[in-house]
Image: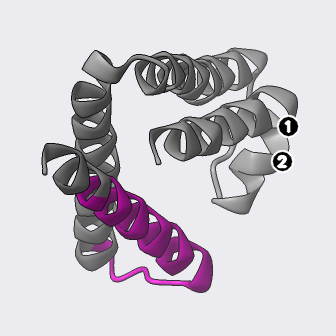
Amino acid sequence: MLALTAFVFACIGGAFLLDTRGIAQQVDIRLDSSRAVVELATFYGGLSLGIAGALFVCSRHVAWLEPGLFVGVAMLAGAALVRAGAMIATGTADGLLMALLLAELCGAAINVWALRTLRR
């Protein structure tokens, strides 16, 4: 499960790296300057790729599985919590945002399940 979470973060990071403007456009982020493109690609692309790498390394070492799964839960649950709160605060709940929220909640739940299974 941890390797799957790493793969998802790698895909997100790769997408932001390869098509920063296209991804931004899908969520109505306006990139009015090259600096904005660099910042978005760096933060979302680079951070997601770094997280993917760290989770993948954790998935390859038995002693690091539990901390890696905990980090996966924390990141995905945190993203879901903030997304849900922002959606409620702004009254915005379109299909894309709902799909992303569902993916974050499912990812967090799968990591919780894997963490509980590992502890048995």
* Residue 19, numbered label: 1
Q: Residues within 10 Å of mark 2 (few under 14, many from 20)?
A: few
Magenta stretch, main secondary structure class: helix
* Residue 115, numbered label: none
In the image, 105 versus 81, the foreground residue is 105
Pick out the residue farthest to the left.
120
* Residue 22, numbered label: 2
Q: Residue at x 42, y 80 (%)?
A: 92
Left or right relative to 9: residue 13? right
Q: Find residue 27 and report its horizontal and vertical position in percent.
A: 64, 59
In reply to whether residue 98 is colored magenta, the answer given is yes
Q: Amino acid at mark 2?
A: Gly
Q: Is residue 114 above or below residue 11?
A: below
Residues marked 1 and 2 touching at CB (< 8 Å):
yes
Instruction: Write down the region rendered in magenta.
Output: 90-113
For the residues labelled 1 and 2, the Cα–Cα distance comes to 5 Å
Q: Residues within 10 Å of mark 1 (few under 14, many from 20)?
A: some
Assign a secondary structure to mark 1.
loop
Q: Residue at x 13, y 45 (%)?
A: 119
Q: Find residue 83 and report its horizontal and vertical position in percent.
A: 34, 62
Q: Find residue 35 and report its horizontal and vertical position in percent.
A: 68, 15
Q: Is residue 96 above or below residue 50?
A: below
In reply to whether residue 101 is colored magenta, the answer given is yes
Q: Which of the 4 quarters of the picture holds residue 65?
A: top left
Assign a secondary structure to mark 2.
helix
Q: Residue at x 34, y 40 (%)?
A: 72
Q: Amino acid at mark 1?
A: Asp
* Observer able to see residue 31: no
